[in-house]
Image (spheres, rainbow, N blue to C red):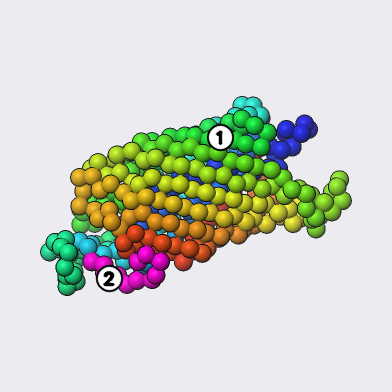
Amino acid sequence: MTANLRILLVVPMFVVIPAAVLASCGSATCPMDPQSLNLPLPRQFTLDVSFQYIDQDQVRIGRREGEVGEIHSHHDEVRTVNRGVGLLANYAPNERLVLSALVPFVSRYHRHLSDSHFEPTAAPQKVRHTLVETWRFDDLGDVAVSARYRFAPAFWATGGIELPTGKRRPANDDGESADPTLAPGSGSVDIFGGVVYQTQIGVPSLSRGPLGNASVMPFFAGALYRHNGFGTDHYRHGPQLLVNAGVNYPLFARLDVLAQVNADFRGRDDAGNTDEDSANTGRTSIYLSPGLRVGLPGGLAAYWLLQIPVYQRVNGIQLTSDYNLVTGVQARF
């Protein structure tokens, strides 16, 4: 095996799976990097089937906890439960290029309190709710395709596009269409690109191999910027910058300890032709994401990552979660 092939096998490459922008209705995906665990060798395919769980039941105002309706709007968010399954396929035609496609499936429950008498004014208003509205749906999300190119021994560039394949306005049992911030499909064409630095560090391990108790620990750090187009009802999600860094510590031959730091910076949305309150969009979040990866027979592996927020600041009033969970199974062939 050549040196370049060994690097491709043991050193992760950073690529952020495109994440739905967290807006007033609380739809979200985890800003982390499970793909770095399963890049293909030249002329090889890899497949990752992942599950994400985010229960947004915490009201936040700025950096502090709040209460439902504390900053009143035409509807006050109560809870959003996001469950997502992602099918990620990679192919490497050579040592410098990796092609990827992500197909997401979204399962979401959302509840808010609606006030048909609300009129935005500068003066405080008495909260007067007239209706509890809920949505439950399971639909295809927006498909993304991307490519990564190694332009220097330790640096890769990545870029891609997300297409408006997801359902845009699913309705609830009362026939009420979901807001653009809640739907699994944005209706927009979005582009993203970034760069990553990657290396490997010699570390002691509990397993024995050709190097005795010594092994190598992959390290990566990088950034990705996302620009969103105009979508449903001319609604436009704000720009997003994701900064990630992480290591995979080889504890045993088939067991890695994972650790990532994930920073997510999101700008305010453009409400377009909707009545959404863009003042309640945009945020800054920083997470610590520990986890494990277990090697299985037949070239398979399973992984688990727990994402814990250590800093959160939102614009206006928004829903947040106490933790995010990502788990998945990977294969290469």
Q: Residues within 10 Å of mark 2 (few under 14, many from 20)?
A: few
Q: Nearer the viewer, residue 180 or 71?
A: 71
**Residue 42 lies within the magenta run:** no
Residue at image location 44% in from the left, 52% down from the top: 265
Q: Quadrant of residue 252?
A: bottom right
The percent coordinates of residue 135 (x first, y second) are 29, 57
Rendered image: mark on residue 4: none
Image point 72% across, 33% down: which residue? 5
Residue position marked by numbered label 1 in the rendering: 157
Rendered location of residue 215, percent (x, y): 79, 49
Question: In this view of the protein, can residue 230 be seen by the observer?
Answer: yes
- Residue 190 vs 24, above or below: the answer is above
Q: Could you say which is closer to the camera, residue 319 or residue 80?
A: 319
Residue type pointed to by label 2: Glu
N-terminal label among 1 and 2: 2
Quarter of the rendering containing residue 113: bottom left
> Which residue: 27% across, 71% down?
70
The amino acid type, in three-letter code, at marker 1 is Ala
Find numbered disc 2 in the image and state the secondary structure of the residue it sits on.
Answer: loop
The residues colored magenta run: 61-72
Please give the residue where the numbered disc 2 appears in the rendered image: 70
Q: Residue at x 16, y 68 (%)?
A: 123
Query: How far is mark 1 from mark 2, CA to CA?
Result: 44 Å
Q: Is residue 51 visible?
A: no
Q: Is residue 55 above or below residue 270?
A: below
Give the quadrant of the N terminus.
Answer: top right
